[in-house]
Amino acid sequence: MNIMKICCAALTVAMTLINSHANAALPINELTHDEATTTVYLVRHGEKQPGRDPLLTIAGEKRAQTLATLFKDVKLTSVYSTNYQRTIHTATPTARLQGLVIQQYNPRALREFATELSAMPGKHLVVGHSNTTHELAKLLGAKPGMPIDDKTEFNRFYVIHLSPPAMQQPENAHSPTIVSSKILRY
């Protein structure tokens, strides 16, 4: 019985922390660039239930709703997800709010997907997994930091800007893109 009380108390504290972070808006508008720039927002799916292709937990569903509210003042060009319930359910609230259809990408073809994303001006949300999100950030030229902890880390939020040569300073105009990135928590 004591373990049950401790678990309930821990869950209450965790939900309070999630709620307090959900109400603190990330400066998404300040992190977007003009239409010629490619901005890629990378997140891992929300907290998941056990199993092979699990649904989100209540905390994961709440995180998906929080993600959608972060983009309420940003017009996304596209929303991408892998073909797994946990990623689709994380992406769905944002796609609905934006009036977009979720496009699927193959998590086993990240290099090709990174090339495709790099060539598309606009603002793109990509929902992935602990391993694919970190790897895609790297393939897009960002410094992704430490690998995402598969068991506990669901709140890493990459913002990656890819500037085309025409927008770069003259000394960098020979390079295909300039990458700037930020890692946030939501």
Image: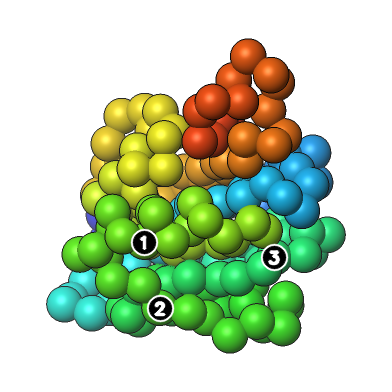
Residue 46 shows up from this direction: no
Q: Name the residue under label 3.
A: 76
Residue 100 shows up from this direction: yes
Q: Name the residue under label 1.
A: 113
Measure the alpha-carbon separation of dots 1 and 3.
18 Å
Q: Earlier in the sequence, mark 1 or mark 3?
A: 3
Query: In screen coordinates, is 174 left or right of 71?
Result: left
Location of residue 86 in the rendering, given as x and y in whole percent from the top left corner: 37, 74
Q: Is residue 137 above or below residue 113?
A: above
Q: How crowded is mark 2: few (under 14 residues within 10 Å), some or many (20 or more)?
A: some
Residue at x-position 39% and y-position 54%? 115
Q: Residues within 10 Å of mark 3 (few under 14, many from 20)?
A: many
**Most foreground residue, 33 or 157:** 33
Q: Is mark 1 on a helix, strand or loop?
A: helix
Q: What residue type is labelled 1?
A: Phe
Q: Which of marks 1 and 3 is in front?
A: 1
Residue at x-position 58% and y-position 85%? 101
Residue at x-position 70% and y-position 21%? 169
Measure the alpha-carbon separation of dots 1 and 2.
10 Å
Q: Name the residue under label 2.
A: 104
In the rendered view of the protein, which quadrant contains the N terminus? bottom left
Specify the quadrant of the image occupied by residue 5.
bottom left
Location of residue 36 in the rendering, given as x and y in whole percent from the top left corner: 72, 50
Q: Outermost residue toward the right?
A: 73
Q: What residue type is labelled 3?
A: Leu
